[in-house]
Amino acid sequence: MTDKKATKERIKRLQELVAYHQKRYHEEDAPEISDTAYDSLVNELRDLTGGDQVSEAVGGKVSEAFSKVTHAVRQWSFDNVFTAGELQEWEDRLVRHLTSNDVNHDGLSYVAEHKIDGLKLVLEYRAGELYRAATRGDGVTGEDVTHTAREIADIPHTLQHPVDLTVVGEVWLSHKEFERINTEREAAGEPLYANPRNTAAGSLRLLDASVTKNRKLSFYAYDIDAFDPATTDISPPSSQAEELQLLKQLGCTVNKNNKICESIKDVVVYYESWTTKQGSLAYDADGVVVKVDDVRLQQALGYTAKSPRYGIAFKFPSEEATTVVEGINLQVGRTGVITPVAHLRPVLIAGSTVARATLHNEDEIKRLDVRVGDTVILKKAGDVIPKVLSVVTELRPKNTKPYTFPKKVTGCGGDGSIERIPGEAAYRCVDRSGDTLNRQRLYYFVSKQALNIDGVGPRIIDQLLDADLISEPADLFTLEEGDFLSLEGFKEKSAQNAVAAIRDVTTLPLYRFLIGLSIDGIGEETARLLVDRFGTFTELRAASQSSIASIHGIGETIAESLTSWLAESQNQTMVDELLKHITLEQGVVKVVSAKLGGASFVFTGTLPNLGRDEAKAMARAAGARIVSSVSQKTDYVVVGADPGSKAQKAEELGVTILDETAFRKLVA
């Protein structure tokens, strides 16, 4: 298939898919993908077509269960931008439009407020009395939901002045109320609702208003679509900010988190201040709505075929997006384990461009049925490694084939053969003596996680290996300044620093030494458990597999891995050579207090003041154990910024969650 034909076919499939998900979202209140994944599909369709073939519908069809309402003022949906650069381009277009139409303007100011993920509602008041409430529908025709809207406490039945006007706002459901509703449904054996937005939409579009009343929906007014000054002595608002003030004056509830911004830079500052705080809000917000403040300029800017020119939705960094798998490569790790990695068409997600995602193992590839050429939904939260959630099979190219693991992988030793580890989903190299693996092990040996040799990283390790100055970890401790001076980029001072950094780790805690050996399954927490139990490397070397396996938190698999590694002659030689240069600090971590009695802690996210290692040390000193994953046996999960899935799992399992302040109090 030619590139042109393939693009035409993809446009057709994207149009069908966007229309399908639009119907699921707007008409059936039962979305199958996240808003951000949907936005990603729409953006790709817009890019491929120049926007010409993207559906102009702003909502969904009107249900036959409700009376139809023709809106006096058409209801629009704002276009989206995702970066400060795109926001600036939007303002540039506004200025060009005003200038070309000879509209006088002396700089643009804006009103910014949260883009709440709820349901748009149009309220008509006659002589100050609520006459009708209607959903947005398709923008021209909506559904009459006056009977349920009257049950929302934030919607006044009578305004403070007997005025004729049309109010536009957002119906939303708080996180707290959403949890209460789902708790009741779970107790009654009913299926749980997926998210607050669709629960709010479904609750408003019920025939039985008593159910709506019980669900305690909320409403924020944010716009005046029509205002008849003849019905009141109140002057018509001349700015967006005045509209919000008038709405409050009339008795409507307005979101207090709005701000007048004198420039686009001020908008960006407002946006960035809420990007990190959105999780603290009572409602879901997926961005910031920005409107030109001056109503005169709003009218002059008018509308495109799809949306108002004078407003834009500046979306928060998405945690999900769609992209295309351009290849699947196998990555050889330092212990010889093979990890499949998806190479992706670069996509902006969670504030950064992502071009790779781990596929974990063969079983995960089969579960997802991910293939080269597939469109996938990708998820990334904070610093969490991007994850492929699912495949959009509707966009799968013809003649794609399921991925199968090869029998040999470049980077393994010997002839490159690989084997599946018995009882596990992972493959590993049969021969783990190759150059690639040796480099990986040396990279890890000097890394922050292991010996932490400051300033000696992978680039310098490569230089040393390529110059035949080292081949094994112990060789590092024989290097002199002259060896480094022979390498490109080194001068006298940098050579001295490199040698000094190596000398600084010649006295080393035993647990860090164990980490640096690249033994399968031996990370920091396991290494600490081993040191706590055996105290010295001599004792550990002499330990039986059963005695190691009996340590709580280790088990048979790691015990077998460790004893097998220690039994290999080449590993024994490597350790003996290292111990000629390194003095190991013996003994266990000093426990200042036993108040936590072996309670297990998981740390996730970035704490405001404490470093991760510092916090773990405080927990250990209070008698706690540190574990890497959350389970029903976990006692506490300490959560910082951008915590990822561990915090969510802790909440699901009912594990106690602590912030930094609560953690400090507990271990003090």
Image (cartoon, rainbow, N blue to C red):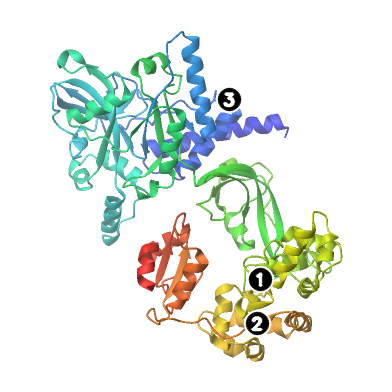
Residue 584 badge: 2
Relative image position of residue 487 (x, y in whole percent): 83, 58
Considering only order in the chain, which callout, 3 or 1, is on the residue closer to the N terminus?
3
User: Dot 1: few (<14), some (14–19), or many (≥20) neighbours within 10 Å?
Assistant: many
Residue 412 in view here: yes
Relative image position of residue 504 (x, y in whole percent): 68, 72
Q: Residue at x 59, y 89 (%)?
A: 546
**What is the spatial separation of the Cα atoms under label 3 and label 2, in whole angstroms?**
65 Å
Q: Give residue 496's quadrant in the image.
A: bottom right
Q: Disc 2 on helix, strand or loop? A: strand
Q: Is residue 35 above or below residue 406?
A: above
**What is the spatial separation of the Cα atoms under label 1 and label 3, in whole angstroms?**
53 Å
Q: Residue at x 60, y 78 (%)?
A: 511
Between circles 1 and 3, the one closer to the viewer is 1
Residue 407 lies left or right of residue 526; in this view the side is right
Q: Disc 3 on helix, strand or loop? A: loop
The amino acid type of the residue labelled 1 equals: Leu
